Image (cartoon, rainbow, N blue to C red):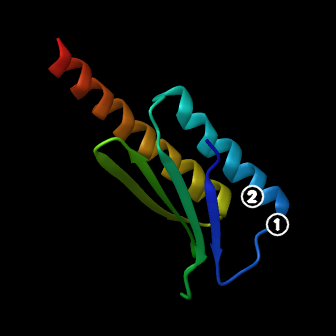
Amino acid sequence: MRAQVHSIDFSASDRLLDFVQQKVDKLDHFYDRIVGKEIFLRLVKSQDTANKVAELKLNIPGKELFAKKQCKTFEEATDNAVEAIRKQLTKHKGKILKNAA
């Protein structure tokens, strides 16, 4: 399933969009029942150099997972958000398998 990528208040390059899509698509390897994927990329107006935010929302049956990371680059923020969601997916999948046993 393709992820919906939204860039808020700026125009994202095709290279950035492709990078984000590839990273988010890797989540399918960890859980095959993903219903929806959305990524929001936004610039935060602050004096800090880490003003790029990636928010990842993942819909799975009966639950919605969310991660928000702020870093110096969109690539780093996306990597961190995908890693956070991967941990949540692994934990959720472990609970499902434990309950099924």
Relative image position of residue 1 (x, y in whole percent): 61, 41
Q: Quadrant of the C terminus?
A: top left
CB atoms at circles 1 and 2 under 8 Å apart?
Answer: yes
Point out which mark residue 13 bears: 1
Q: Is residue 44 left or right of residue 7?
A: left
Residue 9 placement: quadrant: bottom right
Point out which mark residue 101 bears: none
Provide the secondary structure element on which disc 1 rests: loop
Residue 6 placement: quadrant: bottom right
Does residue 20 lie above or below 32 as drawn? Answer: below
Does residue 23 lie above or below 45 as drawn? Answer: above
Kindly identify the amino acid type of the residue bearing the numbered disc 1: Ser
Does residue 25 lie above or below 39 as drawn? Answer: above
Q: Looking at the image, which residue sits at the far right?
A: 14
Relative image position of residue 95 (x, y in whole percent): 22, 27
Point out which mark residue 17 bears: 2
Residue at x 50%, y 49% (from the top left corner): 36
